[in-house]
Amino acid sequence: MNGILNVDKPSGSTSFQIVALVRRLSGERRVGHAGTLDPLATGVLPICLGQATRVVEFFGGMSKRYLAEIELGIETDTYDVSGQVTRRSDPSDIDRERLEKVLPAFRGQIQQTPPMYSAVKHCGKPLYTLARAGIEIERKPRIADVHSLELVDFHSPVVTLDIVCGKGTYIRSIAHDIGQMLGCGAAMRSLVRTRYGRFEKSEAVSMGKLTDAFRLGNWKDLVHAPDCVLTHLPAVVLDNEAEKHMKMGRTLTPAEITETPPAAEAVEATFPADQCRAYTLDGRFVGVLRFNAGNGFWHPEKVLLNL
C-alpha cells in the first residue's frame, strides 16, 4: 500500500484526524499528510501511504491555490471566524476601489507574522498550545511568496480572493493584515485549497467516497503513484547491478546508470538538476538520487523498496 491519496478535506476536521481515519481504513501504519489545513478549511489534502511518506518533503516546493472568503469589520484571536472575537467595527465605508488599493501589498515576496494559533514551534512547543493557555509571545516576521492574488468578488462585508502561493504562507494572516491596512479589521470566513502541486480539488476524493472504496476493496483506483510528485526531476534508468547498489545505499558512478542525467557541468546551472528519479529496467520507481559535485558520484537520497 504505497501511494498518494488526493483527499477533499471537509470543514471541521483537523488534518491529523484525516490521517488517523485513513490509517484505520487502510490498516497501513505509515500514513502522513503533506501540508496542514486548518479545521475550518476544506479542499486538497494529499495523504501519503506506506513508502510514499518518503516523498512528503518534495511537496514543499509546490505552489498552492486557495479561494478565500474574508469578512471585514471583525477581528478574532485566531484570525478566522472560528476564534474569539476581539474587535468589531463598521466596514460600510470600504468600497471596491479602496480595497483594490491595498491588495498589491500582498503580492510577490511579503513579510507576515505567523498567528499565535499556528503550528510554528517556540522552544519545542507549537504556538497554538501556548495560545490555548493564554500565553502570547513575540513572533518574528517571515518571508512568504504570493505568486498571485486576485479579487474575485466583493459584496460588503465579504471579500473573495483567489490566491496562489508558496509554502509557509498563512492565508489567515493575509486576511488579518488586509483588515489592518483598511483600518476596519478582518478575519477569514472560509478557505478552500483548490490546488496543491498537481492535485486539483475537482479530482479530490470525498471522505464518504474514500470510506466506501476501502469497504468495497477498490481503493487502489484512488491511489496515485509516489513518483507523480517528482515529474519536475529528470529520470534515469538503472541496470540490475546499479539497482542493487542503490537499494544498499551505495553511491553510483555515471557509468552505472543506463541513461545519464545532465552532465556534471550543468548540475549547478538549473535547480533541481542535482537530483533525479531512478527507475529499474522494467520501469519500477526506485527513488531519488542526488549528485555529489565533490566526487562526481550519485548518492541515493530516497530509496523506496518493493514498489
Image (cartoon, rainbow, N blue to C red):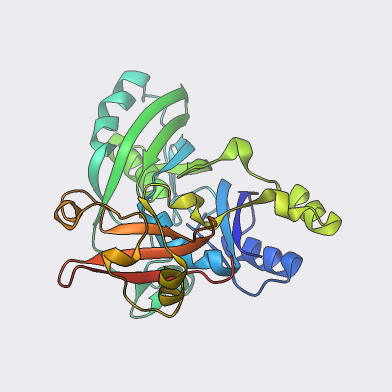
| Residue positioned 48% across, 37% down in the render | 68
Would residue 57 appear left or right of 48 to someone viewing this image?
left
- Residue 169 visible: no
Is 216 or 240 nearer to us in this picture?
A: 240
Would residue 166 appear left or right of 128 to someone viewing this image?
left
| Residue positioned 33% across, 33% down in the render | 148
Please tell me whether residue 287 is drawn above or below residue 172 in the rendered image: below
Is 49 or 289 nearer to us in this picture?
A: 289
Is 72 or 217 nearer to us in this picture?
A: 217
Where's residue 32, x and y in %? 56, 66
Q: Quadrant of the C terminus?
A: bottom right
Which quadrant of the structure image shows residue 179? top left
Please tell me whether residue 103 is drawn above or below residue 111 in the rendered image: above
Where's residue 114, x and y in %? 34, 58
Q: Quadrant of the N terminus?
A: bottom right
| Residue positioned 79% across, 58% down in the render | 214
